[in-house]
Image: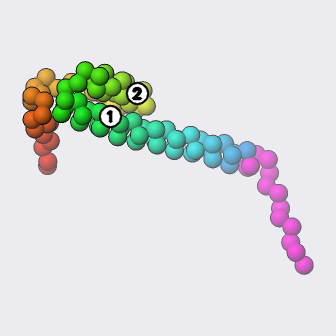
Amino acid sequence: MAREAVPAPRGVLKAYVEQLLYDVARYERECELKVKQDAFLDAYSAWRKTSHPVLRLQVEDLARDLERLDPTFHFTWPRDLPAPGQAGMSYAHA
């Protein structure tokens, strides 16, 4: 004898769908952030090699996008940049 599924109460289904939509929206924001971070790093690296003004504008635009997507992100141009084509920024490792 086949058993019929017991329908879930409407409130449970509604809560499940709302959580699913929230999770999908969060995932989309995370993906957009990762794409922008990659684009920012690529543009900044290209600008460091060439100092092309169009790339500088692209870096600034992407930095604004990242600040909008991630309020903890802040970008300022370093004051002591090496000459274009020379070694870039260095990072200290703990």
53 or 76: which is nearer to us?
53
Residue 26 x/y as whole percent? 52, 41
Residue 56 position, x and y percent, is 27, 24
Q: Does the magenta stretch include residue 8?
A: yes
Q: Is residue 89 magenta?
A: no
> How many numbered badges does the structure rendering display?
2
Q: Residues within 10 Å of mark 2 (few under 14, many from 20)?
A: some
Q: Start and end of the magenta stretch?
A: 1-13
Question: Could you say whether the residue bearing mark 2 is in a helix, strand or loop?
Answer: helix
- Residue 71 seen in the figure: no
Residue at the image position 86 percent from the left and 72 percent from the top: 3
Secondary structure category for the residue under label 1: helix
Mark before the other along the chain sequence, 2 or 1: 1
- The answer to whether marks 2 and 1 mark residues whose Cβ atoms lie closer than 8 Å is yes
Residue sticking out furthest to the bottom: 1
Q: Distance between the residues labelled 2 and 1?
A: 9 Å
Residue at 23%, 36% in the rendered image: 45
The reply, left or right, for residue 61 in relation to residue 18 is: left
Q: The N terminus appears in which quarter of the rendering?
A: bottom right
Q: Which amino acid does label 1 sit on?
A: Phe
Main SS, magenta region, reads loop
User: Which residue bears the numbered disc 1?
Assistant: 40
Q: In which quarter of the image is residue 90?
A: top left
The residue under the point 19% across, 29% down is: 50
The residue lying toward the viewer, choosing from 72 and 33, is 33
Whole-percent x, y for residue 35 in the image: 41, 40
